[in-house]
């Protein structure tokens, strides 16, 4: 049976969600960013089953979206192709003189790279996947990825290829096999209270797994640096004392078990792991005031804790620098972002602009801090970045709702390589996940579903 192509239309700015098959719209500013132009042809395959073809279409969409979300490339519109890829193999004429493609057809379009892919059926839904990337200018094979797959569940292979592509092009580790934790609000139903539980999901919002359940809300999830644990806060009813309290829990992703970690009377919130995994910062309520404490990670609630001196209460939302020497947090009223050297006790206020600053997060590179800010004379949050010395304040977001009103953009979190920022925005009417580059000139919506997303954090 001849290998054939699956034909789909791919646009540079308008494309389809990898998780939900919805249309993604990018917000592109005037600032220019240097990217490579890439042409990704549809998958060649020899599956005749219509269901199989639907799965392969999904893999092609996934491939295009992964390339586009990298922020490193622009994807050439399939409408611009000068060559009928339906009639060509995945090899150039020098290797396949009969049905090979011509490099001229792609160099005429100023494409830097060409991606050609095929799946050869073995049995049922199983097949051999091959994705070849060519450097159009040098006319050389640049990357060749192969995998044995089941097309019904092969997103992992597309993510694995994308990591290889990202590493080869940027020199940095890709993020396509990472996870995100976030609070998801259940779809709103008339007469029902929205439930808010902590989930773990793939970076693109797919394959969601709830790690909490129940009517009481959970919030502030955060990853350990080894990616094994997720700590979070939530309401918990203590039967012995007959009291409802806000406690901190730790979920083990390997054992899939939850440990009650900090349950002192009052509010136990805003957990943040130290890089060594031996200690945690948390905001605890003592004598009616929210202060930040260092808690050794153990099994006893009677463990000795250490108050972080020099902070400005009420203090919440601590985050540790990647080298473990500094802490940022939200303090004072109205909240501002502060930075504290944990060794010397040197303390500095980072943010001065706007009415309200919160949710500070360190970049994995340690050179930037992202936070949510409420601009002066406004009624909404935006995402900003600032350097640890309090300079180079930059506004990242400026999203609008369909009505033209400013959208709420909150809770930033950096990608593992520090090149992208994940955040929530209600630009579409309800909170969904979005991703921005560091310039803020390219912002893309990531999720399209009936949940509402809060407090996302990208895994290391």
Image: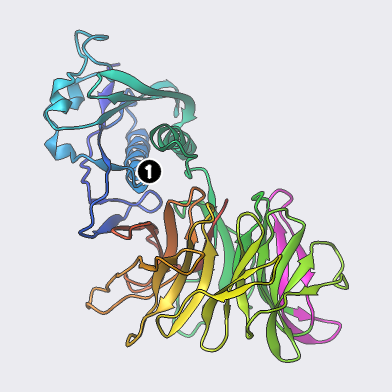
The residue positioned 50% from the left and 39% from the top of the image is 173
The residue positioned 57% from the left and 61% from the top of the image is 199
Secondary structure character of the magenta stretch overall = strand
The residue positioned 69% from the left and 81% from the top of the image is 291
* Closer to us: 83 or 172: 172
Q: Is residue 369 above or below residue 167?
A: below
Counting from the top left corner in percent of width and height, residue 450 is at 41, 67
- Which residues, given as a range, are shown in magenta? 237-264
Q: Is residue 283 above or below residue 224?
A: below
* Closer to us: 18 or 246: 246
Counting from the top left corner in percent of width and height, residue 156 is at 49, 38
Q: Would residue 450 be visible to someone looking at this image?
A: no
The residue that disc 1 covers is 66
Q: Quadrant of residue 232?
A: bottom right
The residue positioned 30% from the left and 16% from the top of the image is 1
Q: Would residue 386 be visible to someone looking at this image?
A: yes
Q: Relative to 79, is 181 on the left or the right? A: right
Q: Relative to 242, is 354 on the left or the right? A: left
Callout 1: 10 Å neighbours few (<14), some, many (20+)? many
* Closer to us: 219 or 289: 289
Q: Secondary structure at mark 1?
A: helix
Q: Is residue 162 above or below residue 118?
A: below
Q: Is residue 240 above or below residue 129?
A: below
Residue lying furthest bottom: 288
* Closer to us: 131 or 344: 344
Q: Quadrant of residue 434?
A: bottom left
Q: Relative to 44, is 361 on the left or the right? A: right
């Amino acid at each position: 049976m001849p290998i054939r192509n699956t034909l789909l239309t791919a646009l540079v700015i308008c494309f389809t969600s990898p998780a939900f098959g919805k249309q993604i719209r990018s917000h592109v500013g005037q600032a220019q960013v240097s990217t490579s132009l890439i042409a990704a042809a549809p998958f060649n395959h020899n599956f005749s089953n219509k269901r199989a073809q639907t799965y392969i279409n999904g893999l092609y969409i996934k491939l295009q979206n992964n390339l586009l979300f990298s922020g490193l490339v622009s994807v050439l519109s399939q409408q611009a192709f000068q060559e009928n890829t339906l009639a060509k193999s995945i090899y150039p004429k020098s290797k396949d003189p009969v049905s090979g493609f011509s490099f001229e057809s792609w160099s005429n379009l100023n494409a830097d790279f060409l991606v050609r892919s095929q799946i050869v059926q073995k049995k049922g839904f199983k097949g051999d996947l091959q994705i070849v990337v060519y450097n159009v200018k040098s006319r050389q094979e640049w990357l060749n990825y192969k995998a044995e797959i089941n097309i019904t569940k092969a997103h992992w292979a597309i993510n694995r290829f994308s990591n290889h592509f990202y590493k080869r092009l940027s020199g940095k580790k890709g993020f396509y096999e990472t996870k995100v934790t976030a609070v998801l609000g259940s779809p709103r139903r008339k007469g029902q209270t929205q439930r808010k539980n902590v989930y773990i999901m793939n970076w693109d919002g797919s394959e969601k797994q709830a790690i909490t359940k129940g009517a009481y809300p959970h919030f502030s999830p955060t990853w350990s640096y080894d990616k094994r644990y997720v700590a979070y806060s939530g309401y918990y009813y203590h039967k012995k004392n007959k009291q409802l309290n806000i406690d901190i829990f730790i979920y083990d992703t390997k054992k899939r078990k939850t440990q009650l970690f900090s349950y002192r009377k009052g509010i136990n919130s805003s957990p943040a792991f130290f890089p060594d995994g031996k200690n945690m910062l948390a905001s605890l309520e003592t004598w009616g005031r929210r202060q930040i404490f260092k808690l050794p990670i153990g099994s006893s609630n009677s463990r000795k804790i250490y108050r972080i001196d020099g902070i400005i209460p009420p203090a919440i939302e601590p985050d540790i620098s990647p080298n473990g020497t500094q802490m940022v947090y939200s303090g004072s009223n109205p909240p501002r972002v502060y930075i504290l050297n944990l060794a010397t006790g040197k303390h500095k206020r980072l943010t001065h602009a706007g009415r309200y600053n919160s949710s500070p997060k360190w970049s994995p590179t340690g050179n930037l801090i992202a936070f949510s800010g409420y601009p002066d004379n406004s009624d909404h949050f935006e995402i900003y970045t600032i350097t640890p010395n309090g300079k180079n304040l930059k506004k990242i977001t400026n999203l609008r709702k369909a009505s033209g009103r400013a959208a709420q953009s909150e809770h930033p979190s950096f990608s593992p390589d520090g090149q992208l920022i994940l955040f929530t925005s209600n630009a579409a009417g309800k909170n969904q996940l979005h991703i921005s580059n560091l310039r803020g000139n390219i912002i893309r919506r990531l999720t399209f579903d009936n949940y509402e997303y809060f407090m996302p954090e990208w895994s290391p």
